[in-house]
Each structure stands twice: as C-alpha cells, then as structure tokens.
Image (spheres, grey):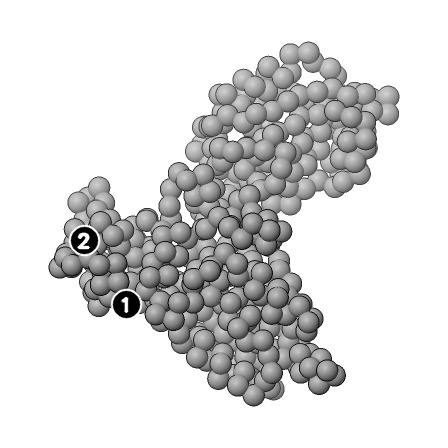
C-alpha cells in the first residue's frame, strides 16, 4: 500500500469502512471472535473496500505500532474460514509509518453478502464507527440484492386467501389474457399466494400489496402519511389500501391542495409514484411520508437505492435495478392511468421539473435505510414565480 494512501486513511475518523485497533493478537477465542465480527461487518456494509489498521489508538489516533508476525495473514484467513460464511477476501500488509510498524488489513468489496458468523448465526454491519447486529430488513435487503430471496414472494403467515380481492385478480387475468377460473392453484401460479411447509396457503407480500383488500392489517408500514403544514396547525391524513388505490387517493388529495398554486405538480407526483413502487416493503413498520409546507415539500420512504446504483448511474443509464420487480410489473399492467410506464427515468423527470425553481435534492441515507426527495416549498416557489 502506498504511503499517500496511509496518510489519507489516518486523517479520517473511524467509520463504516475504517476501524482502528491498538493491537493485533489472535491468541484467545475472544480476540478471534471480535476480529471475525469486525471483518464481517465491514464486508456487509455498503460501499467499496474497507480497512482495519492495527497499531493506532482509536480515540486519539496516536500511532503506537505492532509487532510484526509473518504468519498473520494465514491466521486471519483461518479465522475467516472457520467463523464466517461465505468467506471474505482480504489482504494483510505491514507498513512502516512514523518509525512504527502498522498492520493494514484490507477487506475487499464483497459480491456475496450477507456474511454470517457461524458460531451464533448473527449478521453484523457497521453503524458509523460501531459494529452492530444487522436488523431484519437489512439482512433481507442483502439477500435480495444477491438474488438469494425475493421479499415480494415471502408468505405473510397471519394472512388468509380471502384477503385477496378476486375482482382485482380477475381484472389482471383479463389484461394478460388468462381465461381460467380463479382458483388457489391459479393464485399460486401468479405468485399471489404460496403453499407453506404446513401445506397451508398464504398470500405473498407482493400479492397483498397489489391485490389485497386491506394490506395494512399485516403490513403496517404500507400506508402513506400526508402532512399538510400551510396554516397555523398541521393536518395529517393517512391513506390505506392496495398500492393503486392509495396512489389514486393520494394524487386526488394532492391535486386538490395544489389547485390554487402554480407548481410543477407532475414532478411532485412522480416522487410519490416512485416512493410507492420502489420503497422497501420489508421494512414493515415505517410508512411513506409526504410533507407539504411553505418552505419545503418532501417525500421520504424506507429503502435506499439498490446495491450498485447511484443517482448518477440512474440518470446516465436510465436502467436502474428494481427492488420490487414483481410488484412493478403488476402495477404496469393493473394501472389504467399508465403512471408506471417509463419507470426508471423518474429521477430525471423530477430534476427536469424543478431545475428552474430551486431544484430537487435527493438524499440516499444508508444507515437509516431511507430515501428522501426535498423539493421547493409552496411559498418559496410562489415568490420565485412572481419574479419572472
């Protein structure tokens, strides 16, 4: 590793991809356990390669150095092989720095996330400078990114087949030219329900969200909360139902609110549509939130950009990864207003709609699994337009 790279790393504070350790020792079970957790956590955390630097005090960043061990890389590889599944590629080096010897462990970007600790079955990630147990939705997202599972096809065990609206299923079958009578086998073939190991049928998460009568009974976070903050007090409305029903109701409400304002409404509605089709529905307890105020308008929902995508790559390629591909395809077919055609170019549409009146800001917040779009507020926009 080059000296400039070391200088650059040590100037940084500990974070998701950088950890400082005072010493490098693998003599005890506890030391092996802690190192395995830290390596797995850095590999599981979004971003490129990560580093653990041995021989530095983590609070003061004082360089104290370590004793050189020519067999240390082999020992670390053994720890990884015995304790982490699947294994993680690493490289161990010793570097002379300020007359001290530092150990630099490089943890390469992994294409096989999530990595699990064999001994306790746990998955770890980094939250800032801390190694922590991954939450359920974080584990699910890692599995999904690597095509190991699809959350849309997971059964919702407390739900029942009669919670699926057969009229919507019939409409869908008409649109895709299926002439069969609606049966449990047809619902299974369509991915609307699955047969579990107990030989019982339950709706899938995607089936409930698109075809369910009232998905919020089981998927608490699938509602949309709209906060209107224009007068002396805030007005909050919560919209529930399947995705298309919610979208129809929310759009009708937003159009009513904005009828007396000169605002690029289509750009705002594109934010709302994107939030419903691309949000992380495996994060069961957090709603999509829409805030409409004088100083800002905001749409936020659980679910960062999928692994490997960036705002720039989406704008450049116009072909992003889809978190909810099954849901997205059904919405394209089911939505008579054709609002989901051309999905994937939404960020570009939003930027274009607001480019002359303050712009749109996008926040991809990995450590909170949150995506936010902040737009100009109604009053700011009105003042700007009055100057034209």
Residue drawn at point x = 24 percent, y = 66 percent = 171
User: Residue 283 at what x, y percent from top left?
Assistant: 45, 54
Q: Secondary structure at mark 1?
A: loop
Mark 1 crowdedness (10 Å alpha carbons): few <14, some 14-19, many ≥20: some
Which residue carries the number 2 mark? 186
**Of labels 2 and 1, the one closer to you:** 2
- Residue 234 in the image: state x and y as whole percent: 55, 81
Spatial separation of the CA atoms under disc 2 and disc 1: 18 Å
Quadrant assignment for the C terminus: bottom right
What residue is shown at x 46% (from left), y 28% (from top)? 85
The residue at the point 13 percent across, 59 percent down is 181
Give the SS element for disc 2.
helix
* Residue 165 quadrant: bottom left
Q: Is residue 228 above or below residue 161?
A: below
On the image, the x and y values in percent for residue 105 come to: 66, 26
363 is higher (above) or lower (below) than 74 = below
**How crowded is the residue under tag 2: few (<14 C-alpha within 10 Å), some, or many (20+)?**
some
In the displayed structure, does residue 336 sit left or right of residue 39? left
Which residue carries the number 1 mark? 213
Of callouts 2 and 1, the N-terminal one: 2
> Observer-nearest residue: 273 or 52?
273
* Whole-percent x, y for residue 166 in the image: 20, 65
Residue 198 appears in the figure: yes
**Residue 149, quarter of the rendered image:** top left
Judged from this view, the residue extending furthest toward the top is 70
- Residue at coordinates 63% horizontally, 80% vertically from top-left? 378
Residue 2 left/right relative to 186: right
Residue 38 circle label: none
């Amino acid at each position: 590793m080059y000296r400039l790279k070391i200088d650059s790393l040590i100037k940084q504070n500990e974070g998701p991809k950088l950890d400082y350790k005072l010493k490098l020792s693998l003599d005890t079970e506890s030391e092996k356990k802690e190192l395995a957790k830290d390596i797995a956590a850095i590999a599981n955390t979004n971003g490129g390669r990560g580093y653990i630097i041995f021989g530095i005090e983590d609070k003061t960043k004082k360089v104290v150095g370590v004793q050189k061990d020519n067999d240390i890389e082999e020992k670390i590889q053994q720890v990884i092989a015995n304790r982490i599944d699947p294994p993680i590629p690493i490289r161990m080096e010793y570097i002379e720095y300020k007359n001290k010897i530092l150990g630099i462990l490089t943890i390469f970007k992994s294409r096989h996330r999530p990595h699990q600790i064999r001994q306790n079955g746990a998955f770890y990630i980094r939250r800032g400078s801390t190694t922590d147990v991954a939450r359920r939705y974080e584990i699910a997202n890692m599995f999904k990114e690597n095509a190991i599972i699809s959350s849309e096809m997971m059964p919702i065990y407390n739900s029942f087949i009669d919670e699926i609206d057969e009229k919507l299923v019939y409409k869908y079958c008409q649109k895709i030219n299926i002439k069969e009578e609606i049966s449990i086998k047809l619902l299974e073939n369509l991915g609307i329900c699955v047969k579990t190991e107990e030989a019982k049928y339950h709706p899938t998460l995607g089936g409930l969200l698109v075809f369910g009568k009232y998905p919020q009974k089981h998927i608490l976070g699938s509602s949309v909360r709209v906060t209107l903050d224009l007068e002396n007090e805030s007005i909050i409305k919560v919209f529930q139902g399947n995705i298309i029903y919610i979208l129809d109701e929310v759009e009708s409400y937003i159009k009513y609110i904005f009828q007396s304002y000169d605002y690029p409404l289509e750009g705002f509605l594109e934010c709302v549509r994107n939030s419903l089709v691309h949000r992380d529905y495996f994060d069961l307890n957090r709603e999509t939130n829409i805030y409409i105020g004088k100083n800002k308008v905001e749409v936020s929902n659980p679910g960062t950009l999928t692994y490997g995508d960036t705002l720039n790559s989406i704008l450049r390629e116009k072909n992003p990864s889809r978190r909810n591909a099954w849901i997205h395809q059904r919405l394209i077919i089911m939505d008579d207003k054709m609002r989901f055609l051309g999905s994937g170019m939404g960020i570009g549409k939003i930027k274009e709609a607001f480019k002359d009146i303050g712009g749109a800001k996008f926040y991809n917040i990995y450590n909170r699994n949150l995506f936010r779009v902040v737009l100009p507020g109604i009053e700011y926009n009105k003042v700007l337009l009055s100057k034209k």
